[in-house]
């Protein structure tokens, strides 16, 4: 818990970012999100970013939240 308090962020922000990641990846849809980015930037994000948004970010955020309990 000390690691989260000293080097990390607050609980509210961690939970908000986790919820945002889950909503964008699974409720709104990663395909729709990538199409929106293509409309804004003119190119579609590659597979690396899709994997980061769908797998790496939620896993990392859950690990951060759970590590504060240990």
Image (tube, rainbow, N blue to C red):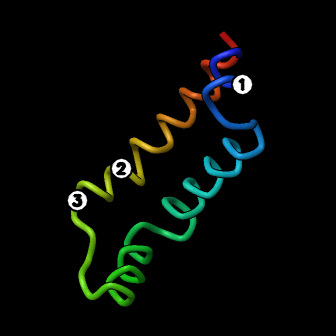
Q: Residue 48: horizontal and vertical position, in percent?
A: 24, 54
Mark positioned earlier in the residue sequence (2 or 3): 3
Mark positioned earlier in the residue sequence (2 or 1): 1
Q: Which residue is mark 3?
A: 47
The residue carrying pointer 1 sits among few (fewer than 14), some (14 to 19) or many (20 or more) residues within 10 Å by Cα, namely: few
Cα distance, mark 2 to mark 1?
A: 25 Å
- Left or right: 68 in relation to 39: right
Q: Residue 21: horizontal and vertical position, in percent?
A: 55, 55
Mark 3 falls on what kind of element?
Answer: helix
Q: Quadrant of the C terminus?
A: top right
Q: Are marks 2 and 3 in contact (CB under 8 Å)?
A: no
Q: Which residue is mark 2?
A: 52
The residue carrying pointer 3 sits among few (fewer than 14), some (14 to 19) or many (20 or more) residues within 10 Å by Cα, namely: few
Is the residue 54 above or below the residue 23 in the image?
Answer: above
In this view, the residue in front, 3 or 58, is: 3
Quarter of the view holding residue 31: bottom left
Is the residue 57 above or below the residue 30 in the image?
Answer: above
């Amino acid at each position: 818990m000390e690691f989260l308090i000293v080097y990390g962020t607050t609980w509210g922000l961690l939970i908000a970012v986790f919820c945002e990641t889950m909503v964008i990846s699974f409720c709104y849809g990663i395909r729709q999100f990538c199409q929106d980015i293509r409309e804004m930037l003119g190119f579609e994000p590659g597979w690396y970013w899709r994997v980061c948004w769908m797998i790496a970010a939620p896993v990392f955020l859950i690990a951060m939240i759970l590590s504060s309990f240990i």
